Amino acid sequence: MNFDPRFTGRNFSSVGTRPIRPDGIDKVTGRARYGADFNMAGQLVGRVLRSPHAHAVIKSIDTSKAEKLAGVKAVITAKDLPDLTDGDAAMYDILDNSMARKKALYDGHAVAAVAAIDARIARQALKLIEVDYEVLPHVTDVDEAAQHHAPLINDQVFTEGLEEKPAKPSNVTKRTQFGHGDVHKGFAQADFIVERSFKTEQTHQGYIEPHACVASVNPDGTADLWVCTQGHFVYRQHCAQLLGLEASKLRVTSSEIGGGFGGKTHVWAEPVALALSRKAGRPVKLVMTRDEVFRASGPTSATSIDVRIGARKDGTITAAEATLRYSAGPYAGSWAEIGAMTAFACYKLENVKTVGFEVLVNRPKTAAYRAPSAPMAAFAVESSIDELAKELGMDAVDFRIKNAAQEGTRASYGPVYGPIGIGPTLEAVKKHPHMKAPLKANQGRGMACGFWFNFGGQTCTDLNIGMDGSVSLAVGTVDVGGSRASLSLVAAEELGIDYGNVKAIVADTSSLGYNDMTDGSRGTFSSSMATISAARNAIKILRDRAAQMWDIPVDDVTWEKGHAIAKGEKYGNLSPLSLKDIAAKSGTTGGPIAGHSELVADGAGVSFATHICDIEVDPETGAARVIRYTVVQDAGKAVHPTYVEGQYQGGAAQGIGWALNEEYIYGKDGRLQNAGFLDYRIPVCSDLPMIDTQILEIPNPNHPYGVRGVGETSIVPPLAAIANAVSNAVGVRMTHIPMSPPRILAALDAEREG
Amino acid sequence: MAGVAVSTTINGDAVEYLCQPDETLLEVLRDRLGLTGAKEGCGTGDCGACSVIVDGRLVCSCLVLGAEAEGRKVETIEGMAHGDQLHPLQQKFLEHAALQCGICTPGFLIAAKDLLAKNPSPTEEEIRFGLAGNLCRCTGYDKIVRAVQDAAVVMKGA
């Protein structure tokens, strides 16, 4: 590959416009097919039996009665999913999470499953399965789980990252450390030091579409899986490995996806559906209920974070330190590590140190949730930054501007930044009219910054030109929020044709090479890079065909605005050939015209945002309400600005829910108390104001059009921005998220009692 | 269990089906009639993704029994456009990008249609409260509210 991904300033024709998305009509007419909207001949209904205990040994499972029920075609337990992971610890955890092998590790952990001719019989069959549990002591709180006397979740876990391997197992899986300089020296130079501790509760991604799939395993070892996922190629690899299938014989088709936000990056019930289908010899549809989604699929970490920051009188931060404890559910991840990396990424710091501890708890396996781990760290750090600004008597925005990271700054997590957007977003906020708008009684304003790495990854794209000159673009990154529109714009831009002549689809795993999943805000970043590369490869062929049609050397043919041009005065009588002209002759000039691209999209540009929030607090009830909200974020280049705004608004809304209301509530019995949308209340339309957006465009030097990922950063600042606003409104520093009415009232009462 | 024979009208067409007494209208629409436009997001009436209109009343079809549709008129998302002519709400949802993943969109469109039928000139607050029974996790509702406002203007002019 000789593709040059470097940014070149250019004038855009298609990129930056706002056309209607290609999948739009299907979605407003009800025709779009999501995970549960697909059926196969002879299909059975799958259902999963889940542990009611937070922590229990599975002594035995008797499935005989369920198997005898008329209409039941298969019953499976962990025995039907033998361990084929060959020492791969991460895959073993995925297997164990799909179906508990020895112990149930959380309320909702799958222990058995059935496939029956209808849902009613499947439900009856679940009741006939007898599981003999030995209930064990459990722990669901991150701080309690980290204590030495806490119930041990996995006796094979010894804390990694310590100087010496500990003698005893622990729920703390890993210690990670980042930073540079000497924080002791730095704090000695400080005139003011702020030290605070914070907690955040566990939240769920809250996608409206529950996990759903249809699995069909054939006797010859071939299989099909239709599934709502953010990464069908990754699902294929995981399912093939867990089921002992050849990856190329398992064709995975990604359905339309009804929200994921990171929660559909991991397999859950898919291996179970495949195992049921294999045993029953028929296709099986498996759809989670909402209760199952909450109890058994991807929540984020609960956290407990200590922050210490010192500054000189002039406002220069001299040292910053944080200790971050993140819950991981019952399996190891990298959640605390990511929090420790992102915590101080917005700032230019000489002396910085962050230490992360990842902690096992009897809760569902933590899954990624939009900029995973970053919002909690930002909440703790940005709250402390506000406190320190107050101590210094400095404006919160000016204090941040003075200490903001710049091009050339060594990030707290290691690398040196290229051109970045933290300074520009802060300057934009400083000038924004929102910052000058008057506030009334019981209202407060807060602002905060956020960072996310962004990701590129493996990407494969095909661009096929039909004989009528229309273009089909097959991408392998699942479209979670309009990327088919943005990628069609990019193909149109590069080829020099109309957006309406391009149709983008998400291809299945048998139709395209491997693609990493749509995570890390990579969909439009990486697939647009691959689309540009594929289009450039197609243009080479188009030029060659034009040269044949004209019978001139290909080196004399250029491509401009959708046309082959014969350059040089000697060709003055040759009219340009349009893409359509060349395509029409393709059958006689060498056959179909296509451009392919396989690449690793390196150089995802880091992303920064600054948010402003106005809050009104009812001092009688403690209820807080967002009355105005503004998002300022760097997009690098907004390919389809309306959908970029949508990402900014959606992330902010999720952050508002997290900040003010959403949390997993566990009883003393270790059972989830609010596994439904009534009691786990995400923001509704009447809870929110309009969410204003301002898109900044600081080009990413590592992308031809300057694109950066935009999907995730918008959820990073809200927890802190809202906490700062509430704290300013009530005059008390809020340190526990969500700031639900009881917590705000308690803070007000504590203040009144002095 | 004996099935219940139901005669009803769906999107203007006479429809007959057999369903179990405990089967919801949502299950009938999706699993028996192939009308998968209504979605099950929760099954408990909390998300509005399964919204349909029964005899002029907005309901969550997961909270209505299939047998209760007897003799009634049911309107679903599949009947919202007239042939290839989109309803103004559908058109404005597309123009405003009032959907990202789109799973909540059929429910929002049905709820918005019901809202505008009862209140052709809603304020922003009336739209926000009128659509508070429908959950969207992608958009933050901003573009949905704007699309409904814009559609209301178009529909009044029509």
Image (tube, rainbow, N blue to C red):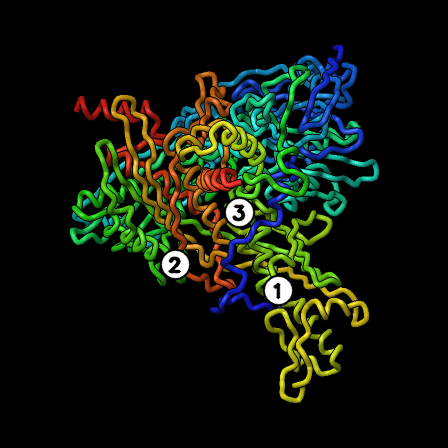
Which of the two residues, A311 or A117, is positioned nearer the viewer here?
A117
Q: CA distance from mark 1 to mark 2?
A: 32 Å
Left/right of residue A414 with respect to residue A477 in the rendered view: left
Q: Residue furthest bottom?
A: A570
What chain does badge 1 belong to? Answer: A
- Inspect the image, locate mark 3, and give the three-letter code of the amino acid beneath it: Glu
SS of the residue at dot 2?
loop
Provide the residue designation for mark 3: B95
Q: Are marks 3 and 1 in contact (CB under 8 Å)?
A: no
What chain does badge 3 belong to? Answer: B
Q: Residue furthest right?
A: A220
Q: CA distance from mark 3 to mark 1?
A: 22 Å
Q: Is residue A335 visible?
A: no
SS of the residue at dot 1?
loop
Left/right of residue A558 with respect to residue A284 in the rendered view: left
What chain does badge 2 belong to? Answer: A
The structure residue drawn at horizontal position 65% and vertical position 54%, both measured from the top left corner, is: A503
Against A746, residue A639 (above or below) is below
Which of the two residues, A455 or A660, is positioned nearer the viewer here?
A660
Q: Tell me the quarter of the image containing the N terminus of chain B.
A: top right
Measured as percent of width and height from the top left, residue A284 is found at 73, 30
Q: Residue furthest top?
A: B1
Provide the residue designation for mark 2: A420
Which of the two residues, A212 or A322, is positioned nearer the viewer here?
A212
Measured as percent of width and height from the top left, residue A685 is found at 44, 32
User: Which is nearer the N-term, disc 1 or disc 2?
Assistant: 2
Against A500, residue A623 (above or below) is above
